[in-house]
Image (cartoon, grey):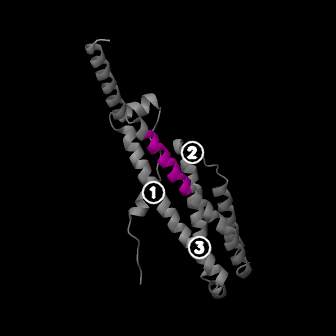
């Protein structure tokens, strides 16, 4: 091999490595795994909440048996929320993702009504088991918010990488990656409106 051929081969190798480094293949793969891990944590926290509900319902039932409709709504909302099969593919399907979001929002709403019912029963509010469960539930809601925020951040990072040039070429043509859906608010106008405070 002549010196010029070796030099040309070395330059081709260096150019190939530069192109490979600039294509973002490994970064895209890493971000994809990060979003899946962040999503798993969201699902884990939702499952933790679902696991607390039977004990909470049983405790409330002991004090507020005639609040049957509220209790049944919580049980039904839990069944709907846990009945949705969540897989990494859910992240690629906006309709399934939205269905999961709606089920979790329904469960949050039903739990809110259940906690409001407890306000009418001083003995229930004083029950140590109920207070412990309520505290665990509040902690879980905070964990859900943190897990969702981490997921939102990971998806934003991933989606930028999928859309920005030149990594978008690798994402689209080599890896066939699309943007991932993110959490949304059902009624953005209602959330944006400041709450009314009456004294």
Q: Are marks 2 and 3 in contact (CB under 8 Å)?
A: no
Eyeballing the image, is 140 above or below 80? below
Quadrant including the C terminus:
bottom left
Identity of the residue furthest to the left in this view: 4
Front residue of this view, candidates 156 and 99: 156
Q: Which residue is mark 3?
A: 136
Does residue 184 appear anywhere in the picture? no
Q: Which residue is mark 2?
A: 88
Considering the numbered disc 2 on the image, is that residue within a helix, a strand or a loop?
A: helix
Front residue of this view, candidates 5 and 110: 5
Number of numbered discs on residues: 3
Q: Which residue is mark 1?
A: 150
Eyeballing the image, is 194 above or below 27? below
Magenta segment, which residues? 28-42
Can you give x and y, in whole percent of width and height, for residue 144 in the image?
Answer: 52, 63
Considering the numbered disc 1 on the image, is that residue within a helix, a strand or a loop?
A: helix
The local crowd at label 3, few if under 14, some if 14 to 19, many if 20 or more residues have their Cα within 10 Å, is: some
First in sequence, mark 1 or 3: give its number.
Answer: 3
């Amino acid at each position: 091999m002549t010196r010029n051929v070796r030099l040309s081969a070395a330059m081709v190798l260096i150019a190939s490595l530069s192109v490979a480094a600039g294509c973002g293949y490994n970064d895209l793969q890493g971000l994809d795994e990060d979003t899946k891990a962040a999503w798993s944590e969201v699902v884990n926290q939702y499952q933790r909440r679902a696991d607390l509900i039977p004990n909470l319902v049983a405790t409330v039932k002991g004090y507020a048996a005639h609040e049957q409709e509220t209790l049944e709504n919580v049980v039904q909302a839990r069944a709907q929320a846990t009945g949705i099969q969540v897989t990494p593919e859910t992240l690629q399907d906006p309709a399934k993702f939205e269905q999961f979001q709606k089920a979790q929002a329904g469960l949050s709403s039903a739990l809110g009504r259940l906690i409001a019912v407890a306000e009418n029963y001083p003995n229930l509010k004083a029950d140590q088991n109920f207070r412990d469960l309520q505290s665990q539930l509040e902690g879980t809601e905070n964990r859900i918010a943190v897990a969702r925020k981490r997921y939102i951040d990971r998806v934003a990072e991933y989606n930028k990488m999928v859309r920005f040039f030149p990594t978008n070429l690798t994402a689209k043509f080599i890896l066939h990656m699309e943007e991932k859906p993110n959490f949304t608010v059902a009624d953005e106008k209602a959330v944006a409106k400041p709450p009314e405070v009456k004294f």
